[in-house]
Image (cartoon, rainbow, N blue to C red):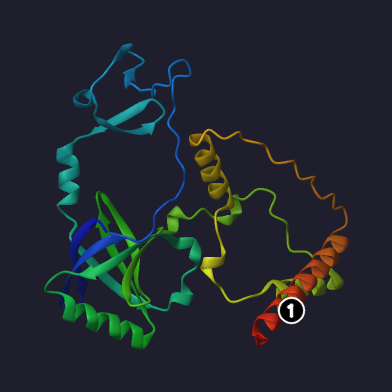
Amino acid sequence: MHTMWKGSISFGLVNIPIKMFTATEEKDIRFRYLHQECNTPVRYKKTCPSCNKEISDPEIVRGYEYESGHFIIIDEKDLAAVKSEIDDKAIAILDFVNLSEIDPIYFDKTYYLAPQETGSRAYNLLRQAMNDTGKIAIAKITIRTKQNLAVLRIYKNVLVLETLFYPDEVRPISQIPGLPDETQTNEKELDIAIKLIDNLSTPFDPQKYKDDYRESLQNLISKKIAGQEIKAAPDIPPRNVIDLMEALQASLKETKARSKAKTKTKEKSKQPSIV
């Protein structure tokens, strides 16, 4: 696993040297754009529409558009001056809170933290203390040029850092168009909806979920590479559900049948085999 950041956790007067690793990865299948005539990958050139010419990287500067069509130039010296005020090699713990107090909308990206050669003892101490208290830490960390709000928590036996969105980065729900006002709920519909939720409730097992589209796309690619003929699957007719109560009752009936089938399968698997 590639180390993407090295620094330390600042815990009061204690410094814990750590290495950081990306904990998740995207499995999306990516395509290249090709010239249809010869299958050559297409290149994208950087051009200036005003000068009508291609430009190189040294000719490009950073600009901030403070009004439409008006820019101020930010150079490397400006960025260095701002960066000098921030410790970009420390995860500074600010507070300890309960995980339940943070809404999942704030969570962004996850990283594993491992101790460097001299940090194992302090790493283990912080991990055990957080485990015993059930608390997570609110912290700040600078990754590349962005200062991130983050939390430190325990995942299995590893200290994990999760970057958070700042409050002003979470859009207010007042901006959502067409959000229904609070209205009186039909009691019968609510009762069936609650029963439907109960029927679909189960302990969380991440292994049971998969990306069906990615698997189908990978299967198509494998067949194309092998030169097999690709046959399109038949279209599934959409369900024409008009009445909400009808939909709820049909869903409840379907989940009950599914639950009974699962129960029978479990009972059969528990039965001793006859030799």
Asked if residue 253 lies left or right of residue 83, the reply is: right
Q: Position of residue 252 (x, y in %)?
A: 80, 69
- Where is the C terminus found, in terms of image quarters? bottom right
Quadrant hosting residue 134: bottom left
Asked if residue 195 lies left or right of residue 60, the reply is: right
Q: Is residue 12 visible?
A: no
Q: Position of residue 209 (x, y in %)?
A: 56, 62
- Where is the N terminus found, in terms of image quarters? bottom left
Q: Position of residue 241 (x, y in %)?
A: 85, 53
Work out which residue is located at the far top of the displayed protein and give it: 52
Per the image, label 1 sits on a secondary structure element best described as helix
Asked if residue 76 lies left or right of residue 68, the reply is: left
Q: Amino acid at mark 1?
A: Lys
Q: Is residue 62 visible?
A: yes
Question: Residue at 34% of width from left, 88% of height from top?
Answer: 132
User: Would you place residue 111 above or below residue 274 in this image?
Assistant: above
Using the image as rendered, state which of residue 191 and residue 272 is in the foreground.
272
- Please give the residue where the numbered disc 1 appears in the rendered image: 264
Using the image as rendered, state which of residue 270 and residue 184 is in the foreground.
270
Question: Residue at 19% of width from left, 35% of height from top?
Answer: 75
Work out which residue is located at the far front of the displayed protein and give it: 275
Q: Residues within 10 Å of mark 1 (few under 14, many from 20)?
A: few
Work out which residue is located at the far left of the displayed protein and give it: 118
